[in-house]
Amino acid sequence: MTGAKSRIIWGIGLLLVGMSLLVGLSASRLTQPVWSLASFFKEAENDHRVGNVCTVKDEHGRVISQVSRRVAGGDEIFTAEGRHYRVVRVQSNTAYARFIGMDKDLLAYNEFYSRLEVPVVQMARNTRPVGIYHTHSDESYVPTDGSESIPFKGGIYQVGESLVNRLKNGGVRVDYDKTPHDPHDDNAYYRSRRTAVRLMQNNPIALFDVHRDGVPDATYYRRYISNEQVAQTRLVVGRENPRMQANLDFAKRLMSYANSVHKPIVKEIFTARGDYNQDLMPTALLIEAGTHTNSKEEAERGIALLADAVPVVLGLTGPTPEGMPKPITDRTAGTPGSWKALGWIIALTLLGGGAFLLISAGSWDRAKSRLSDFFGRELASFFAPRRARKPDLDTAEKATHTPAPGHKDPDASEAAKDHLERIRQD
């Protein structure tokens, strides 16, 4: 095998790898990617392990949050009041976060939803379903289930049923997939992705992966809200996916409206390292319903209160109140994160194409020469008359075999050889 052929084969191989990355990062709902850049960071999704708790503190040592997951620098917290924190350092089981400021989107949503009167009668105006599933199908509630984990049939299923029933009572179609994804390990999200992709085939308007947390203190989530003792919820957004900004915007709207109706049913939004299969659509979220030391009934009542906000935020039921922000599902509304996703795709395409060109050319100088010559030929071909656009193979052959005046070697023109080779390949 010649060196040139070897370089071409390697270039093609690298280009195929680039295409695989492109598919994985594709934001298209039609392609249903089964791989993404976040696959490299799946170990960060080892969450809800009982006893594996991280306490997040601010610059003054005050506790901001407690989470049963691996916390990393860059993770962010958005409180129900609109305070925005970013983790800057993690030391053992303690993370330290810097106060970024009040989030302007949350402040705007909180202000608007606090003045919004909920329609008494709601008429369904969208028939797309809400997809619901459980990545950690073993998760349970100790006070009522007797264990924090029941493989393949955890108490989390009854919590999911509570969400389903409340949505259905509100006139929302629901597609509930009860496929188990045990064991509770780092690969659970790989297995649950197949379930999420199946749900996507029914064109859902949103996708919810329902979990419970693993913080030992039951009072951390327990509240008395709307005349009921309930377990609060937390919304989690994966920050290693191209739809992250859209997912986050959806979470902000949902938290703001839910808390305006049943304050404070949503404790916070946590953006964590990983993707949680949220690259599939802009309205995909992970919901944590209480923790393993809450009773299952508390979690059921809590997630039912959260469900009351889902139809309005998604624009599924009722008329849109005057002045209300367009639902994230409205095709005429802006979708945060779309340009970022497009940027990833373009960057990977250019990277793959550039690597292929470099390997096939064999050196930087020859790669630049070929690129310059390509654009020169294409532009000249575009503006030239049609009869001049097709290269003359015979003329090019003669250029490589006819000695130029003052030269004795007919093969001295390396550029002419390259030009002839490209013509033959074309």
Image (spheres, rainbow, N blue to C red):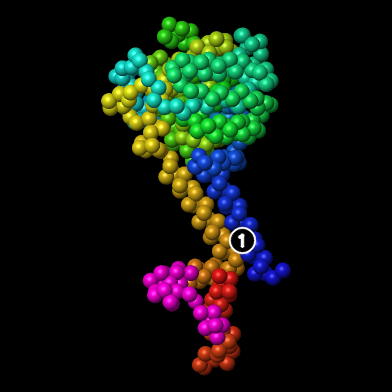
Tell me if I can see residue 236 in this picture: no
> From the image, which quarter does the C terminus lie in?
bottom right
x and y, in percent, of residue 378 in the image? 45, 69
Tell me if I can see residue 205 in this picture: yes
Which residue is found at the position 33% from the left and 29% from the top?
A: 325
The residue labelled by disc 1 is 11
Q: Nearer the viewer, residue 10 or 50?
A: 10
Relative height, residue 394 to residue 307 (above, below): below
x and y, in percent, of residue 31 in the image? 54, 42
Taking the magenta stretch, the answer to whether it contains residue 384 is yes
Indicate the quadrant where residue 109 lies: top left
Magenta-tinted stretch: 374-398
x and y, in percent, of residue 372 in the image? 47, 70
Total numbered labels: 1
Which residue is found at the position 61% from the left and 9% from the top?
A: 143
Which residue is found at the position 60% from the left and 64% from the top?
A: 359
- Left or right placement of residue 102 versus residue 56 in this view: left
Taking the magenta stretch, the answer to whether it contains residue 224 is no
- Left or right placement of residue 254 versus residue 43 in this view: left
Indicate the quadrant where residue 78 lies: top left
Are there few (<14), some (14-19), or many (20+) residues within 10 Å of tag 1?
A: many
Furthest residue in direction left, as rendered: 322
x and y, in percent, of residue 355 in the image? 56, 59
> From the image, which quarter does the N terminus lie in?
bottom right
What kind of residue is marked 1? Gly
Relative height, residue 125 to residue 12 (above, below): above
Relative height, residue 197 to residue 233 (above, below): below
Furthest residue in direction top, as rendered: 227
Q: Nearer the viewer, residue 104 or 361?
A: 361
Which residue is found at the position 38% from the left and 30% from the top?
A: 327
Q: Nearer the viewer, residue 290 or 89?
A: 290
